[in-house]
Image (cartoon, helix red, strand yellow):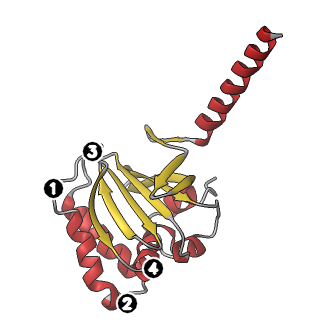
Amino acid sequence: MKKTNITLGLILALLISATQLSAQASISGVTLPATLKVGDHNLVLNGGGVRVKLFMDMYVGGLYVTTKGTNGDAIAKANEPTAVRLHIVSSLVTTDRMKEAILEGFKKSTGDKTAPLQARIDKFVKVFSLEPITKGNEFDITYTPTGGVQISKNGKVLETIDGLDFKSALWGIWLGNEPADKGLKAGMLGVAK
């Protein structure tokens, strides 16, 4: 009887481990974990993909949410904990190129109405100037209703920016009607083909 219970316990442990591993995503050599802790919240991986430019992989992006969904606009505008993880996979991603891409992304995300957010956009862009961006860097951009948008690089918190309006515009860069990369958006929303 004890041997049967031990065997059943081992099988159950293996099944749980296999389920957790299968919920991870391995994209372009980067493993996105199945869950991400943001404050007191455990978020789940909604999906992930690659930002491609000129036929080259730039970064892997993962979207983490409280409840999985496929509506990018709703996720961007939701006043609930969410996170975007960016893992740089190319040495072509530089501080200047990142800043340029962010500014272009905000213009598209807001329909070129960045004025109300400009001071916060500038604060966000400045984060990428604090030190050089190198291949292998990992940025976590998280949002909670009480904590705002927090930007971390390689596990170190660099900046916090308030406002659901800012979070919505920022998430719109990846999930909006004119996303930075349509394939990345589809991957993050779990609808990639």
Q: Does 36 sit above or below residue 82?
A: above
Q: Residues within 10 Å of mark 3 (few under 14, many from 20)?
A: some
Residue 79 - label? none
x and y percentages locating residue 182 in the rendered image: 51, 64
Q: Residues within 10 Å of mark 2 (few under 14, many from 20)?
A: few
Of 120 and 50, nearer the camera is 120
Q: Does 79 sit above or below residue 193?
A: below
Marked residue nearer the N-terminal end (4 or 3) = 3
Of 64 and 86, nearer the camera is 64
Residue at mark 1? 131
Closer to viewer: mark 4 or mark 1: 4
Q: Residue at x 64, y 64 (%)?
A: 70
Element under disc 2: loop
Marked residue nearer the N-terminal end (4 or 2) = 2
Closer to viewer: mark 1 or mark 3: 1
Q: CA distance from mark 1 to mark 3?
A: 13 Å
Q: Residue at x 16, y 60 (%)?
A: 130
Cβ atoms under marks 4 and 1 closer than 8 Å:
no
Closer to viewer: mark 4 or mark 2: 4
Q: Residue at x 61, y 55 (%)?
A: 192
Residue type for callout 3: Lys
Marked residue nearer the N-terminal end (1 or 2) = 2
Residue type for callout 4: Leu
Q: Does 21 sit above or below residue 10?
A: below
Residue at mark 4? 164
Marked residue nearer the N-terminal end (4 or 1) = 1
x and y percentages locating residue 34 in the rendered image: 55, 45
Residue 113 - label? 2
